[in-house]
Image (spheres, rainbow, N blue to C red):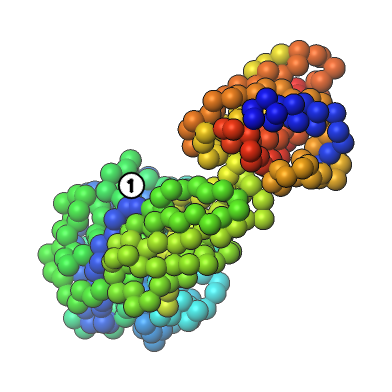
């Protein structure tokens, strides 16, 4: 059967063609409740910082200090407000002799009643940046110095509570580095306890102790409630055939689900979902429009969206370096269902995709010819090398690369995604 497959393939070449585990509690606070953490040098960086966490706000009528470390609220330091000067918008703030503010232009009422990830980053002489749900919403010039005063409070500064935050807090982290927007967006769904620059983590899983450092509270008021904070889950396996139909298991914390949630692969809902236990959801993979797609997996229930931090891949998929030289060997990375036979084509785009025989998907290029055949792929993911013709006339030209993947006996086959490469 393999010889039959190869005969068809070489004839084809001349044809035209186209978690991590999450805790189950969070800290619910009224405007009169607070967490007090004593001043410590580790909470007073001199060059850069990042502070982030999940909040579920319940009202907008107070200033709502989410956290602040500024003596009397007016001293030098940092803070994040839910309702900046009662104008209906959230803000991240730094003070060093004067106040620097990055304010969300959207009204804060759009965040009420649901979990959202808030983060602020800053670097001396750089920028103060405010992120919500992994997206940069505001940026301001940062001060040329970091100076600090006072103790660190979550919510109010005392039981008087005039400026306290009303809502729920979960998974707050303090860093002595300026994290990038990509890092914040990627890691906001993860439980982290070991990363460069990570100073303190407050999980709020039944207490307010710092699980990484020594910044434990001296006073703690509030009530611990079941958490629906949208932290990540893992998906196993993390790939499926583009036609779908396989079942995968989502492992995380799904306590309290009274019925199966909606599970999305990209924007497509799973046709079959079941809850196995409070840490496992089973979902059937829906079909994709083509092989090689990379999507996120999300779980949606009332009040929360949980998203897998890693990517889910529809196979077969190939990827390679975008720039190559004549006579070089090109590394091709693959993901597919083993065992498999692979033929790789180099050709030109600009022709309509063509269907061949009973093969899945279509050939999306006009092939120069098959470059390589690897008969014994037995892994779900790996790489092999493909020789590029040693011809200087190829320099400056752009080509497309596509694979044809057949099962071990050659009965079934599918084209992969098509990628672009340039000879330089």
On screen, residue 262 versus residue 266, left or right, reads left
Specify whether residue 230 is in view. no
Residue that appears at 82% across and 20% down: 394
Q: Position of residue 179 (x, y in %)?
A: 43, 48
Vertical relation: 237 (above or below) 387: below
Instruction: Rate crowding at label 1 as few (under 14), some (14 to 19) or many (20 or more) other CA atoms within 10 Å.
Output: many
Vertical relation: 191 (above or below) 64: above
Q: How many marks?
A: 1
The N terminus, quarter of image: top right
Q: Position of residue 193 (x, y in %)?
A: 27, 48
For this orientation, the residue located farthest to the bottom is: 61
The C terminus, quarter of image: top right
Vertical relation: 80 (above or below) 423: below
Q: Position of residue 208 (x, y in %)?
A: 18, 64
Q: Secondary structure at mark 1?
A: loop
Which residue has dot 1 on it?
176
Res 225 → quadrant: bottom left
Residue that appears at 40% across and 80% down: 113
Q: Position of residue 117 (x, y in %)?
A: 41, 64
On screen, residue 23 versus residue 216, left or right, reads right
Residue that appears at 25% across and 78% down: 29
Vertical relation: 380 (above or below) 110: above
Res 319 → quadrant: top right
For this orientation, the residue located farthest to the left is: 218
Q: Nearer the viewer, residue 153 or 111?
A: 111
Specify whether residue 193 is in view. yes
Q: Nearer the viewer, residue 154 or 97?
A: 154
On screen, residue 315 versus residue 258, left or right, reads right
Residue that appears at 42% across and 64% down: 306
């Amino acid at each position: 059967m393999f010889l039959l497959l190869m005969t068809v393939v070489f004839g084809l070449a001349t044809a035209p063609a186209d978690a991590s585990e999450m805790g189950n509690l969070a800290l619910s606070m009224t405007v009169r409740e607070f967490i007090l953490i004593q001043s410590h040098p580790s909470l007073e960086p001199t060059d850069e910082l990042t502070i982030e966490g999940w909040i579920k706000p319940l009202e907008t009528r107070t200033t709502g200090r989410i956290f602040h470390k500024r003596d009397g609220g007016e001293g030098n330091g940092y803070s994040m407000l839910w309702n900046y000067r009662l104008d209906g918008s959230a803000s991240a703030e730094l003070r060093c002799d004067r106040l620097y503010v990055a304010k969300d232009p959207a009204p804060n009422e759009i965040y009420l009643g649901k979990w959202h990830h808030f983060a602020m980053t800053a670097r001396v002489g750089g920028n103060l940046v405010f992120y919500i749900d992994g997206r940069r919403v505001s940026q301001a010039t940062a001060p040329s110095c970091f100076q600090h005063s006072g103790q660190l409070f979550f919510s109010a500064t005392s039981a008087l509570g005039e400026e306290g935050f009303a809502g729920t807090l979960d998974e707050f982290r303090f860093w002595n580095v300026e994290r990038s927007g990509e890092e914040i967006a990627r890691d906001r769904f993860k439980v982290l306890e070991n990363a460069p620059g990570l100073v303190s983590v407050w999980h709020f899983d039944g207490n307010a102790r710092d699980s990484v450092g020594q910044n434990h509270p001296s006073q703690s008021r509030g009530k611990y409630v079941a958490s629906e904070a949208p932290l990540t889950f893992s998906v196993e396996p993390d790939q499926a055939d583009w036609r779908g139909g396989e079942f995968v298991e989502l492992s995380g914390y799904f306590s309290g689900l009274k019925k199966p949630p909606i599970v999305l692969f990209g924007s497509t809902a799973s046709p079959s979902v079941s809850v196995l236990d409070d840490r496992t959801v089973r979902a059937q993979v829906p079909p994709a429009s083509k092989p090689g797609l990379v999507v996120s997996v999300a779980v949606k229930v009332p009040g929360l969206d949980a998203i897998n931090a890693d990517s889910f891949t529809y196979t077969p998929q190939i990827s390679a370096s975008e720039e190559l030289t004549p006579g070089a060997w090109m590394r091709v990375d693959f993901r597919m269902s083993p065992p498999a036979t692979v033929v790789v084509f180099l050709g030109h785009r600009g022709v309509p995709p063509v269907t061949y025989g009973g093969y899945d998907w279509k050939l999306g290029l006009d092939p120069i010819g098959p470059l390589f055949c690897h008969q014994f792929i037995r892994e779900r993911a790996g790489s092999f090398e493909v020789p590029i013709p040693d011809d200087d006339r190829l320099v400056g030209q752009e080509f497309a690369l596509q694979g044809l993947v057949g099962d071990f006996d050659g009965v079934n086959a599918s084209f992969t995604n098509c990628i672009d490469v340039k000879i330089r």
